[in-house]
Image (cartoon, rainbow, N blue to C red):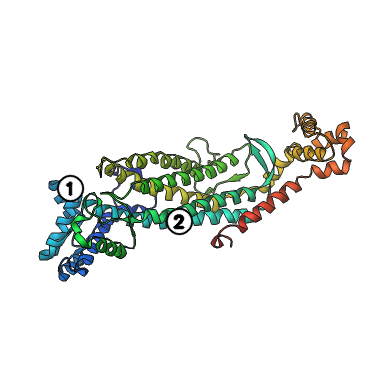
Amino acid sequence: MADDSSDLFCPLEFRYGRAAVRDLFSRGARLERALRVEAALAATESELGMIPKDAGAAIARVADLEHVPVAKVDELEATLRHDVMAMTRALADAAGASGRWVHYGATSADITDSALALELQESVRVLRGDLTALARALAHLAREHRATPEIGRTHGQHGIPISFGFKMAVGAAEVVRHRQRLDEILPRLAVGKMAGAVGTAAGFGDRAEAVEEGVMRRLGIRADEAPMQLVGRDRVAEFVNWMALVASTAERLATEVRNLQRTEIAEVAEPFDEAHQVGSSTMAQKRNPIVSENITSLARLVRAFAPVPMENMVQWHERDLANSANERIVVPHAIVLTDDLLVKLEEVLRGLKVDSGRMAEEVARSAGGAFGESLVLALTAKGLARSDAHEVVRQLTRNPMSPPSLLERARADPVVTKHLTAEEIGAFLDPSSYVRAAMAKTDRILAGLPADLRG
């Protein structure tokens, strides 16, 4: 029988996000990580002689979902009203006589924060892969269209020509910066603790440092160098704000696709399944950039999460619980949605339809007006004051898309012809010089990308 999803509440459960990424934050996955921490603690303490050796082995053998199922923990929490205590009770029951040594010397935050570090470490691997795939898609477009002329636009108006590849190369460099930031954040993020109540580790006595080192080594993370009862929440705040930055880049690129797909411009189009996809329930002719719009919508939500972890940096004294509830919502939602929008953007760019002919038409439609900068510079170089040269060209480019062309106007203007020959005017109003400059810049950007993105 098919699963009945009619009673699902959160859209992440049935509409947004990849199943494999959502699974990182399932109740079972989170419980399993907490049990890993408890197992690492017991193994370390038995190694140090703080608890019997057979106790450490016995606890490790049952620190899994088979012996400590979610349902059992839920049943205990309903009475105890404490999630970590419910988990340790269930683990202790499963460990039999050795259960008395479960959680020895630790406090709840030692377990939850170390488990969170494992969760964030796994999430970073996913998001780094997303950024790599996105950067490769952008770099591919940059190489393919390094010489494809496109009108550059500022304030939504024609500026000067660029190449479409240059625009994509700029996007690739921006994504690479986010990947570099993530690499820098990871050592600060994958940080746990085994320091007991209020962070002094008094419960572990003179073995405190060895306990923490052993647990973190087994978990493959680093210890917070200065925790209180919680790992410093500046770490989580930095990560969520990093995701907000990434979301803004994704929205910027998606917005570019949306604008260039407008009927009046029609220079690119995101993939559309002509055989089956419907653009509108009413207007059958529609081919809407719905994926790019979806990316935009999700990016706004990811950014909206960013302030909450900064609020969580403020704790009462050595700790309070004001961060706990919202972190359970904000962190997984931000990660799942950031992954979702990055994967969708990569798919859009991989299948992007680029109409180079339409781009060339738009460059030509400027009737030379987009090359006025070259004429200003040429007149200035020939001896005219720059402000005077600017005014001459400003007058010549009034109604620039109406005939005659700027070339014809310039060749008929006495001030221009006093300083430039007809051949020189033609050379300076040649769009190929702008495209060559864009090509050279594109090549430099691509050459500066990390080695795994250059091929």
Would you say residue 351 is visible in this rendering? no
CA separation in Å, label 2 and label 1: 35 Å
Q: Residue furthest left?
A: 97
Q: Which residue is mark 2?
A: 183
**What crowding class fits label 2: few (fewer than 14 Cα within 10 Å), some (14-19), or many (20 or more)?**
some
Q: Earlier in the sequence, mark 2 or mark 1?
A: 1
Would you say residue 439 is visible in this rendering? yes
State the image quarter where residue 224 is shown. bottom left
The residue type indicated by label 1 comes to His
State the image quarter where residue 10 is shown. top left
Secondary structure of the residue carrying tag 2 is helix
State the image quarter where residue 389 is shown. top right
- Position of residue 90 relative to residue 433, above or below, is below
153 vs 388, nearest the viewer: 388
- Residue at 32 percent of width and 52 percent of height: 226
User: Could you say where residue 409 lies in the image, as x and y percent from the top left?
Assistant: 83, 33
User: Could you say where residue 219 lies in the image, as x and y percent from the top left?
Assistant: 30, 62
Q: Which residue is mark 1?
A: 82
User: Could you say where residue 118 lies in the image, as x and y percent from the top left?
Assistant: 33, 57
User: Could you say where residue 358 lies in the image, as x and y percent from the top left?
Assistant: 67, 44
152 vs 281, nearest the viewer: 152
Screen quadrant of the N terminus = bottom left
- Residue at 47 percent of width and 47 percent of height: 246
Screen quadrant of the C terminus = bottom right
- Residue at 80 percent of width and 43 percent of height: 428
